Image (spheres, rainbow, N blue to C red):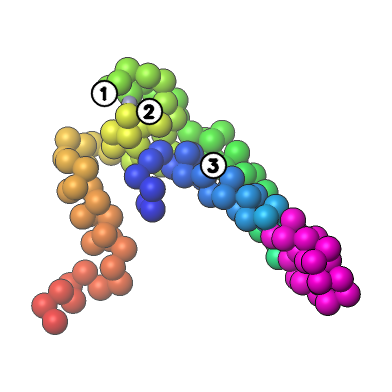
C-alpha cells in the first residue's frame, strides 16, 4: 500500500487524482489552440486523447472500488469505536488507520511486523536472502 490508509480510501484518492490529471490535460490541450493556433491543434488532440484515457482509468477505478465496497465488511473499530469498512483479511481503519485483521494467525502483531510479512510475501524468492 502506497498510502498508509484504508484500501477504500486509497482507491478514492487514485480515482480523484486520475480525474484531476485527465481534466488538466484536456484544459491544457484546449489552451494550446488559443496560444499556438494551428500548431496547437496537434497539442489539443494529444491532450484530449490522453485526458480521456486518464478519465476512463479513473472511471474504472471508481467502478472497481464500488464493486469491492459491496463485499466490504462493516465492523466497529476496536481502537476508535467508529464504524469502518474492511476489504480483504487485513485493512486499515478509515479513521484512525489502525491495522485490522480477520485472520487469527496474524492477529495481535504490530503494524511493522505485518508490513514485514507483506514485504516477504511480495519478494519473488524469500529463501534467496543469503546472496
Ligand atoms: Zn479506528
Relative to 106, is 122 on the left or the right? right
Local crowd at mark 3 within 10 Å, few (<14), some, or many (≥20)?
Answer: some
Task: Say which of 29 and 110 sits in front.
Answer: 29
Q: Is mark 3 within 8 Å of ligand 1?
A: no
Instruction: State which tag comes first along the sequence, 2 or 3.
Output: 3
Q: CA distance from mark 1 to mark 2?
A: 10 Å
Q: Position of residue 30 (x, y in %)?
A: 80, 60
Local crowd at mark 1 within 10 Å, few (<14), some, or many (≥20)?
Answer: few
Find ligand 1 in the image and state its quadrant.
Answer: top left
Q: In this picture, is 52 found above or below 82?
A: below
Local crowd at mark 2 within 10 Å, few (<14), some, or many (≥20)?
Answer: some
Q: Position of residue 85 (x, y in %)?
A: 44, 30
Residue holding disc 2: 95
Q: In this picture, is 81 found above or below 21?
A: above
Q: CA distance from mark 2 to mark 3?
A: 15 Å
Residue holding disc 3: 12
Is residue 83 part of the magenta span, yes or no? no
Q: Secondary structure at mark 2?
A: loop
Relative to 23, is 89 on the left or the right? left
Residue 2 visible in the displayed image: yes
Magenta stretch?
A: 25-47
Is residue 26 part of the magenta span, yes or no? yes
Instruction: State which tag comes first along the sequence, 1 or 2.
Output: 1
Q: Secondary structure at mark 3?
A: helix
Q: Secondary structure at mark 1?
A: loop
Q: Name the magenta segment's main secondary structure.
A: helix
Q: Is mark 2 within 8 Å of ligand 1?
A: yes
Residue holding disc 1: 79
**In which quadrant is the C terminus drawn?**
bottom left
* Location of residue 33 by image quarter: bottom right
Amino acid at each position: 500500500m502506497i498510502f498508509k490508509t484504508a484500501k477504500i480510501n486509497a482507491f478514492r484518492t487514485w480515482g480523484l487524482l486520475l480525474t484531476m490529471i485527465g481534466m488538466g490535460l484536456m484544459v491544457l490541450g484546449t489552451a494550446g489552440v488559443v496560444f499556438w493556433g494551428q500548431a496547437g491543434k496537434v497539442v489539443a488532440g494529444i491532450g484530449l486523447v490522453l485526458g480521456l484515457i486518464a478519465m476512463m482509468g479513473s472511471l474504472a477505478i471508481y467502478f472497481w472500488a464500488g464493486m469491492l465496497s459491496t463485499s466490504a465488511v462493516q465492523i466497529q473499530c476496536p481502537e476508535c469505536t467508529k464504524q469502518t469498512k474492511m476489504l480483504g483479511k487485513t485493512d486499515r481503519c478509515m479513521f484512525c488507520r489502525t491495522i485490522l485483521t480477520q485472520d487469527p494467525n496474524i492477529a495481535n502483531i504490530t503494524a511493522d511486523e505485518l508490513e514485514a510479512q507483506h514485504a516477504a510475501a511480495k519478494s519473488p524468492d524469500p529463501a534467496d536472502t543469503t546472496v
